[in-house]
Image (cartoon, rainbow, N blue to C red):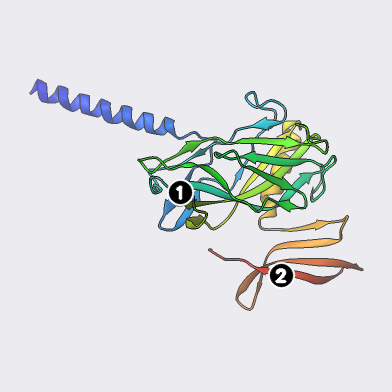
Amino acid sequence: MSKKIFNLGMALVCVLFYSSVSAQDQHAGDIQPWRVGAEIFVNNSLFEPDFGDLGGGLFATDEPGFDVNVEKGAFTPGNWLRFQPVGQLLFWNGTDWISAVPNGERIEITDALGNVIAFRTEGVSESTAVIGEIDSEGGLHEHVEMSIFDAANALGGSVGAYRIQLKLFESTANDETSVSIATLPITLVFNRGLEQDKFELAVSAAADLNNNSVFVADTGILTIQEVKALGTFYKVKLQHLGNFQFQLIEANEIPKTQ
């Protein structure tokens, strides 16, 4: 009887130890995607990397990492986890998110193959990036280098917050055709030297951008992230004509999942 109790106790210890190790493997601050069918889900829609972190210095970071949550949904071993850059680089001027930067700043991400993906205020690179190869367990834990450059093409950036977006997808090796994809993009809001309370204001405003309208006074363009018309959802841009009047200049259909 004592032997059976001992074995049961050892089994319980092993289970608890394994569970503890599994929990520690998931890094809380990382982007944690998982796959269900052909759709990719993520643990959060917004992340707050810091160009002033200890590992990267003032103008670079490799946080957050990408850490697949295998328990919720593994990917296919041998496939590549990738991302598509989305939209444009935005800068927090202390009051609003605007599509202009103080000194020609851009953010670059160097992928697993050494390719550089650039985010600028006028748009993003057309090419996609490779985060890494899915392992035999259907998981992946990788970090990519993210840096900020100024108009002189040197590492550097004006004090403030910077916002970019990217959309995850999975492909077979050496192929850009997606076999699974995230419906919505991930937002990264970088802190470049702001005090924490001021940075949190920028983060809060960035979180609202996904569902609210943004007006850029310099251009007079109002962007509304989601408008429903005749049963279809659109992202629209309107030009301010004065006296609180606007003219529709662009409308792009968007998928609606909720």
Q: Nearer the viewer, residue 81 or 32?
A: 81
Mark 2 in CB contact with mark 1 (< 8 angstroms): no
Q: Most extreme residue toward the bottom, as rendered?
A: 230
Residue 231 drawn above or below residue 88:
below
Residue 37 placement: quadrant: bottom left
**Disc 2/disc 1 C-alpha distance (Å):** 35 Å
| Left or right for 75, reference 156 | left
Q: Residue at position x 72%, y 27% from top? A: 58
To which residue does mark 2 refer?
251
Q: Residue at position x 75%, y 42% from top? A: 106
Residue 75, percent from left and from top? 41, 48
Q: What residue type is labelled 1?
A: Ala
| Left or right for 163, reference 10 | right
The crowd level at tag 1 (other Cα within 10 Å; few <14, some 14-19, many 20+) is some
Residue 239 drawn above or below residue 144:
below
To which residue does mark 1 refer?
173
Q: Which of 132 and 198 is in front in this view?
A: 132
